[in-house]
Image: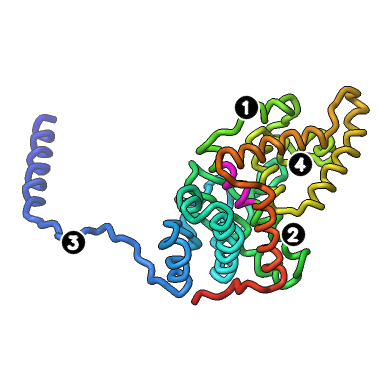
Amino acid sequence: MKKYIISLLIVTAMAAVSCTTDRLSSESVIKDSTVEMNDFDRWLEANFRVPYNIDFRYRFQLDESDKNYWNVPADIDAAIIYAHLVKYLCVDTYDEIAGIDFTRAYFPKMFFLIGTWEYRNNGSIVLGTAEAGKKIMLSGVNFLPDYFDYYDGEELTEILNTYYIKTIHHEFTHILNQTKTYPETFGQITSTTYVGDACFDTDQYWRGRGYITAYAQSEHREDFAELLSEYVTHDAAWWAEQLEAARSETTNVREDNPDAEYGDVLIQSKMDIVSAYMADSWGIDVDDLRDIIGRRFADVGLGRVDLNSVE
């Protein structure tokens, strides 16, 4: 046994000595990935990175994606359309309402696109997420061209708003809230009826319970973001319809709880806090913001904006 151990040590030592004669290459085996810029990359450089320091990523990157979901890359033609929509309906909108310095300072510094929706186990889909006030992930990009093929006018703009643009305003609201908090009184108005990560069943008469959307029922932060994003991406007539529907739906709620406050009163009470927060914290009038977004949406719906150019 001793001879075996000694022999093994000698062989190991000889191997170590022989290895010292090998020379390492001065060139690293780790290579930086390089992608040749195309016309779209140059358009993004000129319209996002240079003026706003915004990194708009459309090529798939595993590290940027949420590994809890099945994801596919965004098609470049769809990504071009989405980039134009983000620029015209969001970035330019905040330039107009609050100035380019505001947009540069607070708008997220990265957009990351994925091709399909992210499906949750409660039956809902993830349209987008905001991370640490710096990044917004946007999903469902590859469906965009089909919507433009089959719809136009107000019908098109409502679809674009529901699945894409409202999401950006919603997520940007989270970023603003992370920078400057809103009053605690907001969450106290309907504090006992948030449902958390549950299935957002429309049979719960959510407007009658004081929520502008089913998703707003999840918690007060989502409630705040849903209120602001829904308000500024629809006109005054739509808002009046929602309040009227909330008053009507409260009838069903009061069958189980006769003392329940009317839903329209709850919604408007929370919206008053949202409006005051935007005015006091950011100097933004939500009615003026709504008018700007509505005008820009009309331009898109009527085909006045070239969404495919990368020149």
Q: Reply yes or no: does residue 185 show up in magenta.
A: no
Q: Residue at x 72, y 30 (%)?
A: 194
Q: Earlier in the sequence, mark 1 or mark 3?
A: 3
Kindly identify the residue that appears in the image at 81 percent across and 34 percent down.
265
| 280 or 176, nearer to the observer | 280
Write down the residue under mark 3.
27
Q: Position of residue 197 (x, y in %)?
A: 68, 35
Q: CA distance from mark 2 to mark 4?
A: 16 Å
Q: Earlier in the sequence, mark 2 or mark 4?
A: 2
**Where in the figure is residue 145, as x and y percent of width and height?**
66, 69
Q: In the rendered image, which residue does mark 2 sit on?
A: 158
Compared to 299, does 230 lie above or below?
A: above
Which type of secondary structure does the marked residue at label 2 adopt? helix
Closer to the chain start, of discs 3 and 2, is 3
**Residue flagged by tag 1: what amino acid is it?**
Glu
Find disc 4 in the rendering and name its residue. 212
Q: Residues within 10 Å of mark 4 (few under 14, many from 20)?
A: many
Q: CA distance from mark 3 to mark 4?
A: 60 Å
Sequence order check, earlier mark of 2 and 1: 2
Between 128 and 28, the one lying in front of the other is 128
Secondary structure under tag 4 reads loop
C-alpha separation, residue under disc 1 versus residue under disc 3: 58 Å
Quick one: SS at disc 3?
A: loop
Q: CA distance from mark 1 to mark 4?
A: 19 Å
Tag on residue 235? none
Mark 4 belongs to which amino acid? Answer: Ile
What is the crowding at mark 2: few (fewer than 14 residues within 10 Å), some, or many (at least 20)?
some
**Residue 258 falls in which quadrant of the image?**
top right
Pointer 1 with pointer 3, Cβ within 8 A: no
Q: Amino acid at mark 2?
A: Glu
Q: Identify the image quadrant of residue 93.
A: bottom right
Confirm whether residue 204 shows in the render. Answer: no
